[in-house]
Image (tube, grey):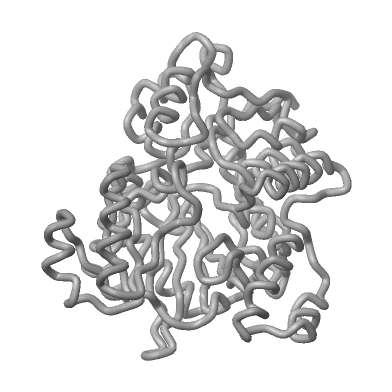
Amino acid sequence: MTRRPALLVGGGTNTLSVGRRLAAIGVPVYGLATTPEIRFSRAFREVFWPAGAPAGGRENEERTAEWLLGEPGARFAGAVMLACSDATLRVVARNREALAERFTLDVSDPVAQMDMLNKRSTYEIATKSDVPTPLYWTVQDLDEVIERRHEFVYPLLAKPVFSHEYEARFRGKFRTANSPDELVTEYRELGEAGIECMLVETIPGPDSLLCSYFTYVDESGEPMFDFTKRVIRRCPPMRGVACYHATTNDPEVRELGRRFVQASGLRGLANVEFKRDTRDGQLKLIECNARFVAPDALVAAAGVELAQLVYRRLTGETVQWPTEYRSGLRMWAPVDDLRALIALRRAGELTVPAWLRSVAHRQMLQVFRWDDPLPAVARGAGRVRKVLTGNYR
């Protein structure tokens, strides 16, 4: 069977997983504007970067759109195009009609997708649909922050309205302010960098209180399946990317995730993240992603082949949405988790014996695969370079 090519745009670890899952069923896979190590994967026929595009940001969105709609993209006319990053979602939302004339696109509601990219809109939708959130405040400018700085609760997050714009320029995902003076300093620096942000209460407690819901929403607004997982640790703790995950079957996460997804108007992929607040026991919204996310390999290994299901749906094949999956499956990024151990041990929050007990399970690795080892090797080499140059993230 000759399969239609797939063009995966943007992303990193998630894109690698999607490419591997599609290549496994014979799909010719290509990448655009991905992280560099993906070019070493056996799953990808070729990986491209728009000429002159930086690692991220608005200029990258413009270059990506020009590539897709210009002469380079014409080579892939008719291909299934899948968005694997927030920047790409915005490219698709802003150019959907033109892109749909050239590529096969997944179902979506561009307005709803833009609302999920905009953290302020995400929280406002949650509030209207009775989905609990942390306390949050919208402020217009630095003068308002200075005037109201004693009204807020601390520690406080200065959370970028558009996360990918912040991540293109700074490390991490947000700024933390432990006092009114720190808030003014952080907000001023973000404002000078052109980063719009909102203020969000910090939910206390460890990263193990984080959990999330996955689904795919059809044209009628009906979720096609339910999947839940939890985070065991992040790196760096309390502010970084999850480095250790486990699948769950959590009815409370499922119910709240479904409620938010249906209230949001999303179509297509949806991933909703929550954290349990130990002060009142409630799950509270952190964010929502309308795309493939980093734990895609774990979701697939548990029995929900998201990439293959979406591809088959878009190419007119019969799709059997899963009704069950493996709970208790774990995915581990050992180097990052070791860094998390070091940080948590210094803070007196985790001992080496407790860490060893936590990893004494059958594990799947986040990036490394015996049949496709080079992306992990390339990533490791890149991190060594960063350590040697003092730019380790």
Return the residue nearer the eye: 169 or 245.
169
Q: Is residue 87 left or right of residue 225?
A: left
In the rendered image, residue 205, in percent from the top left (x then y), is placed at: 49, 83
Return the residue nearer the eye: 149 or 223.
149
> Is 219 above or below relative to 144?
above
Number of residue marks = 0
In the rendered image, residue 308, in percent from the top left (x then y), is placed at: 65, 44
In the rendered image, residue 185, in percent from the top left (x then y), is placed at: 29, 60
Quadrant location of the N terminus? top right
Whether residue 204 is visible to the viewer of this picture, yes or no, is: yes
> Is 325 above or below relative to 356?
above
Task: Give the quadrant of residue 204.
Answer: bottom left
Q: Kindly identify the residue that appears in the image at 41 percent across and 36 percent down.
A: 57
In the rendered image, residue 284, in percent from the top left (x then y), is placed at: 38, 75
Q: Kindly identify the residue that appears in the image at 18 percent across and 63 percent down.
A: 145
Q: Which residue is the extreme one toward the right?
A: 370
Task: Give the quadrant of residue 89.
Answer: top left
Q: Is residue 48 left or right of residue 362?
A: left
Q: Which residue is the extreme one toward the top?
A: 71
Q: Kindly identify the residue that appears in the image at 72 percent across and 70 percent down.
A: 329
Q: Kindly identify the residue that appears in the image at 38 percent across and 75 percent down.
A: 202
Whether residue 315 is visible to the viewer of this picture, yes or no, is: no
> Is 305 above or below relative to 334?
above
Q: Is residue 105 left or right of residue 36?
A: left
Q: Is residue 17 left or right of residue 273?
A: right
